[in-house]
Image: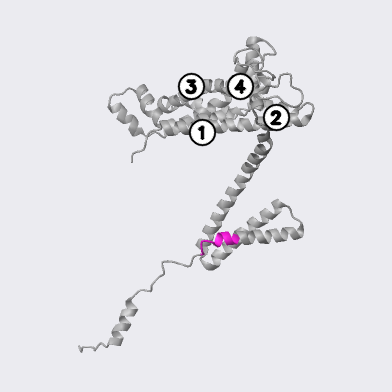
Amino acid sequence: MSNQLTTPESAQLSVESSTPLAVPLSHPRLPRWAPLAAAALAVAAATAVGILLGWGLVAIVSVATVLNLVLVTGWSRAVENRRAAKDRLMTALVWTSFGIALVPLFSLGWTVLSKGLPQLSSEFFTGTMRNVIGEGGGIQHAIVGTLLITLGAAAISVPVGLMTAVFLVEYGGESRMARWLTFLIDVMTGIPSIVAGLFAYALFQLIFGPGIRMGFGGSIALSLLMIPVVVRSCEEMLRLVPADLREASYALGVPKWRTILRVVIPTSLAGIVTGITLAVARVAGETAPLLIIAGKTDSTNWNLFSDEPMMTLPVFTYYSYTQPGIPANFGQERAWGAALVLILIVMALNLVARYVGARFSPKKAR
């Protein structure tokens, strides 16, 4: 066989033919200001068309939202690629949904603040509606009633709900009783609030006679609504505790009841407190049960167990708006002030829950 001579040109051609084609690892990207520019262009176009055609604010915002989605997706498809365009579209949809969810929240907050904030004064917090006709009066009796009835409901619901959750997680397992309890809790979750009020009224009517109005009856009615929420939230938090912590405690010879008290509950305390706070916030604004069993009064009732009516903030708001008296504007203004105070109380409860959860939850290792 004869040796073939290899020239530099043929060697270079053979190397180039054996080298794979380079695939780019990056592709063109839109600038960071592209979404803002598309949103601004969509708003400008929708506003111009809306002014010319006489549209309202809702129509302009809706058209601007649709134009923004089209512009962002089309621009990305032209510059980037199909996959990036889908990502841009989904991101825009998420932000749009977030903005839609904020609309009722800010609208509600602005309405309550604008109408209720001018009513807040020292007289509004320290006075009552006893012998008040027209301007003046306060909501001290409603605040006291709300706090007492809600505290009574929490005193009933928290121990019962927490111990029920402990039984379902630690002792019940797959037993028949655990399944029946879970089913009944699910049924109680869907009970209408007015049915709870009717049950409490019927129960107290059998014990004390017809026409009974009592603050403790309101606590019983609210506890029927609060217990399922407490059980569900505490049950989920207890199930999140790792089984290794329980087994380590058992390995040290700690009995089960002490393991639950010293290991399981402290580990899940932050979530338990948050769930209890949500349950309190769930029942603090209930009106229908308290209308039936707690009743209405213009004076402060400090005794939760007396057979006299007890006013609460939701009931005060309802009566002030539906039966404002003469002149009507004073009663409706007091209703907005009471609604704002109720919202502030619920916010204060959430802040306390966050502090307790952060203060007593187990510290994470660094």
The mark that comes first in sequence, 3 or 2, is 3
Q: Look at label 1 and name its amino acid.
A: Leu
Local crowd size for mark 4, using a 10 Å CA cut-off: few (<14), some (14–19), many (≥20): some
The magenta segment: 30-38
Q: Horizontal and vertical percent for residue 45?
A: 67, 61
Q: Residue at x 41, y 35 (%)?
A: 240
- Residue linked to disc 3: 159
- Residue linked to disc 4: 144
Q: Residue at x 41, y 69 (%)?
A: 24
Among the 4 quarters of the image, the one containing residue 11? bottom left
Q: Look at label 4 and name its amino acid.
A: Val
Q: Is residue 355 magenta?
A: no
The mark that comes first in sequence, 4 or 1, is 4
Local crowd size for mark 2, using a 10 Å CA cut-off: few (<14), some (14–19), many (≥20): many
Q: Look at label 2 and name its amino acid.
A: Arg
Task: Indicate left or right for 253 with 290 as reference.
Answer: left
- Residue linked to disc 1: 351
Task: Indicate left or right for 31 with 18 as reference.
Answer: right
For residue 334, the mark is 2
Task: Decide which of 230, 102 is in the foreground and name it.
Answer: 102
User: How far apart are the two marked residues, 1 and 3, measured between alpha carbons?
Assistant: 22 Å
Local crowd size for mark 1, using a 10 Å CA cut-off: few (<14), some (14–19), many (≥20): some
Which SS class for mark 3? helix
The mark that comes first in sequence, 2 or 4, is 4
